[in-house]
Amino acid sequence: MASQGDYAVTSPSAILQKLCCKITGLPDDAVLPYYQLSLRIISSKFAPAIETDEFQVSEKIKRQLARKGREKDAAIFSELHRKLKAQGVLHNRWAVLHLLMTLSDTGIKRQPAPSFDSSIFNKGLPAYATSTPFHPTIRANNLTLSGSTILSGGSSGISSINSGLTNSTTPVAQSFIPGNAVVSVQNNRHEDKINQRQTVGTKSQTITNKNFESAVVPRTLGTVVSTKTPASRDKENTSFEIPENELLKDLMFAFQGIEGQWIKFNSAKDGYRIEYQAGIPKAVRQLISKLTECGWLYNKIKSYITSWSSDKAFGLVGQSFCAALHQELAEYYRFITVMEAQVQHEFDQGIGHVNGGLTLRRLAVWTFDPLVRLKVLAALVDVCKGKKGGALASAIYSYMQHGDPYVRSLIRHTLTMVFQPIYATLVRWIYDGELEDTYHEFFVASDPTVNNDKLWNDKYSLRKTMIPTCLSIEQARRILLTGKSINFLRQVCEDRTATTGREAAMDLDISQAETMFTQDVNSAFQQMIDTVYKETSRNLLDVFHSKYKFLDHLKAMRRYLLLGQGDFIRHLMDLLEEDLAKPASNLYLHNLTGILEMAIRATNAQYDDSDTLKRLDVRLLEVSPGDTGWDVFSLDYHVDGPIKTVFTPESMILYLRVFNFLWRAKRMEYILAMIWKNQISYAKSLKSIPELNKILHQCHILGAEMVHFIQQVQYYINFEVLECSWDELLTKVHGAEDLDHIIAAHQVFQDTVISRCLLDEKSRAILTQLRTIFDLIIQFQTAQHQFYESAELEVAFRDKFEKMKEKHTEEGDWAVTEVEVVEEQKRKEEFLNTVIPSTWAQLTVLSQSYQDMVQQFLVMLTCHPDVNLRFLSFRLDFNENYKARAPEQFNSPLMYQRTKKVTK
């Protein structure tokens, strides 16, 4: 066994002392300060912030050797370092290299009483910081060993004050690097600091003018010794200087928002100011003013946290933001704790600032990173004032695209915490349809007063102000539709099929919130949204089509309300002709319902689904004075359940308006068919009265014009409007990705039909003109019917007179008497002089009115913004008959200008 003496020789402390002697070349009695410094460095708990620190130290050593002209030694060192790494014996090579570099970098002259150069321990804290999340690192300071106080008369005032001799070393300062470990701060921290400041203030000794003149005092860092008396100073008291330890003490208080003995907070100027009576040079005052910016920023951030943390209405996002700020301030507290420990240690031991001690200049270097961090946090506080929820997250995200990686890492860490409640709410919404948003900070809003029948259209909506800017409008819409589809399936369709992938999504860590604002480099969030959206929408559409037969109901609308079932509509008109010709007040709903059932059983409509036929019904519109049954009759289709989401009450009213228009147009076609039939029939029966040929010819001409007009209008309505729009609707419905696409396609279909059928506001005048033409057709039917009745009666009278003559002749009597001949002649003259002229005048006026109305209608169509209606005008006047009658109206400059504007 090794003896105790052997152990003393081979102990780590003895080896370290020998190593110091070997490196410095000093004897054992003179190497004591370096031995203590080495012991201090080795016993410190520090670790490199990044894995390349060993490389950085080795490179620094080689650069120092190269600058001294020792390139050969640098090469030898590089080879030895390579072999050391290859052996793998030492695990903490960085510390060993750092120790060797520190000891060899002192520049010591081999003298019995060494004087230390100030460059030995001027490293301070590192001027860089790691990104959040962080790896806490404690870097060892090159601490100073106090020696004899020496005043260099020719110095520039850069050396530090030595207030005593000591072999103790100062605590190691720690850089302000964000870490997972948070230093706990007592609630009564400010009160303790104030009491501590008062205690320290009583211990501090002020160097008076008398003492300063009689004593030799070294200059402090950044200060200038003044020999002016109090009477000679003009604005500032510079006849004595405040010790730098006192100023450092006050700065520690100012860093925490507490007033010190010399540094006070000026609320009027919103900043820290140095006492007017303090004997501090101007340069030092400026340096202190820059350092107190940390305290001012700290106050701003702390007041924001205090004012909003207790406000429950601030919401979860706001509370998360306050928690992130508090976490950053905890790192700031740790920095202050290290600084305070070093200042207090030096103050208690009376150590001056020789070489490695804490000075204002070193403090300015060490506060660089905390200051940058506080500035960023203060900027976030300013931009987030008055905001909450998604708006607050958007405000913070606006700083994400920052060029400084240090700032970007801080913003990213803050955003991760802020987006966590938003992400948690979003996941519950898209997988379960549950919306837990007590403080209205999520971008999906719910109205609890809306019933289930209006759930899809009215209950849920987007709060556009709460949509985070990292999400696109399309993403927000898909998120809204996904949760809305789940609620629609469960509450309206009574389908509780679980969403695919729900269990896996619920097991994901909440840290996945980061994927929301890093979509430029990570597509995980977009893939999740797309997958859930497509799966949920597909389930909803399957239920909508299979269980509730949406397409069947849509086709029923086309067949019955849009008159697509031709045989049924024609037979229904035949059955209703007699009843609808009556005044509207004489109609009875149950009679019309019975006629509807008869029309269904007599046509192909009987083969439709029973559920569809049960929904078909008769509806009477509001009766106005003078209305007939044709004016108030309408078919109706009852909808309920989920399909009511598409066929809303508003859309059903539009269907009724279109049906009323189509029913009128169909009636005109029906009337003109009856007119033509009567013309053909009466043209043969009235040949016996040649005086009627002129009137019959006029009736045929006017009837032909009307038939052409109605046929072209019907063709336009049935094919260019209804069939084309219907084909587009079916294409969109079959290709729809969600229910909103179906609703939108259906609305476009209805809007197209409404506008092209002249039922919108901008076509009101043209529709009025068209209805006037329809009324003229009805008047023509009435006039012709009356004429045919009179002519038929005249034919009957003449046939009767001829039969009477034949009968008298057969009886052997005179065929007619003179009196009978006179009476017959008188009756004929009365017919020819009354009925024919009046009928001719009526038809002439009617024909002229019709032509004028059609001509005006064509002019209005030509100026219509819809190109399809302009093409209708060309088809109605294909031979330019109406244009030839009034070319000035069709070729007027005003009309040309209107057409040009519409074309543009």
Image: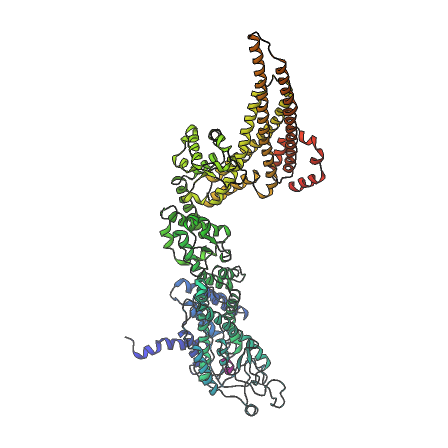
List the single residue furthest toward the left: 1
| Residue 841: % across, % down | 66, 28
Q: In this view, does 879 lie above or below 478?
A: above
Could you say which quadrant of the image residue 442 lies in? Answer: bottom left
Q: Please tell me whether residue 247 belongs to the stretch shown in magenta.
A: yes
Q: In this view, does 220 lie to the left or right of 900?
A: left
Which is nearer the eye, 704 or 17? 704
Q: How many labels does the image show?
A: 0
Q: Please tell me whether residue 683 belongs to the stretch shown in magenta.
A: no
Q: Is residue 365 above or below residue 395?
A: below
Start-end of magenta stretch: 244-248
Residue drawn at (53%, 62%) of the image: 404
Which is nearer the eye, 842 or 241? 842
Q: In this view, does 543 lie above or below 790?
A: below
Magenta segment main secondary structure? helix
List the single residue furthest toward the top: 812
| Residue 791: % across, % down | 59, 22
Q: Can residue 878 be seen in this view?
A: no
| Residue 24: % across, % down | 46, 77
| Residue 232: % across, % down | 63, 89
